[in-house]
Amino acid sequence: MSRNMNLKRMWQKEARRRKSNDFRKDRMVRNWPIHAQRAVEVFSAFAMEAAKDGVRLTVTGPAWSDPTETLGEFIIGSSSVHMRFATQYTGEGLITRTAERETKQLDLERGSELILHHSPSDGTIQVFFEHPTLRNEEQDRKEPLLYAFTYNTDQLTNDWLASLIPPFLTFNRVESRLELPSYLDTCRMRWWHFTDIRNRRGYLNTFQHLLTPWELVLMGAFAAIPSVALIKWVWEIV
């Protein structure tokens, strides 16, 4: 009888946790459209500021309608808000000339993209930074950077949404062929990749190290200098 009571209490405890998590996820699903619209407004306001200097950013929000009348593949359940730099001509390309005709292929860079993604299955909001790609590199897209995530839609305030923009701009400066990053920009990028939770848990195909092999060699060399000096000093005393 005692054992059965213990088993009952075990399940009651688990049931309470499940109910609490289901309530949290249901609340996120109900609130997500409000916060998604807020994100669209914040990102659109920034895009308007960038447009004043001739930089085009496109902002798209979730499609709430069910595409039952349209052919193709569609993701259901999860949805996202996107802000992306416009496609730009890099100034390079390829001309192919034959006896019959001449064709020109321009290198176009598809801009970096900030993705605010909502997944109802696990009740998360994830912030991804998608790498820019050239048109002929679409099949070799890099794994996007998971910059931030939260289990609470209340965190999606105007200030929090706005705080995602500066790191996204840094990401674009580092990854775009058309921009020039600072050394601090590259250091920040390394840190973000290193601290990406997928990297820490080994989910990515390649582990992202904080330091390059060359930097590790330099650090080892500098660390060895005091030891060499100490050995030399002891040798001279002896």
Image: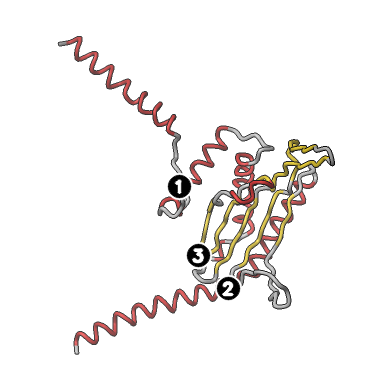
- Badge 2: few (under 14), some or many (20 or more) residues near its Cα, within 10 Å? many
Q: Residues within 10 Å of mark 1 (few under 14, many from 20)?
A: few
Q: Which label is found at residue 206?
A: 1
> Residue 130: where, in percent of width, then height?
60, 51
In the image, taking residue 102 as reference, residue 44 lies left or right, namely left
Counting residues from the start of the chain, the first of labels 3 and 2 encountered is 2
Residues marked 2 and 1 touching at CB (< 8 Å): no
What's the amino acid at mark 1? Thr
Residue at image position (76%, 42%) is 105
Choose between 149 and 73: the one closer to the eye.
73
Residue 23 place in picture, x, y as percent: 49, 77
Q: Which residue is mark 3?
A: 151
Q: Which residue is mark 2?
A: 29
Question: Going 48% across and 76% down the picture, which residue do you hit?
Answer: 22
Q: Secondary structure at mark 1?
A: loop
* Quadrant showing the N terminus: bottom left
Q: Amino acid at mark 3?
A: Tyr
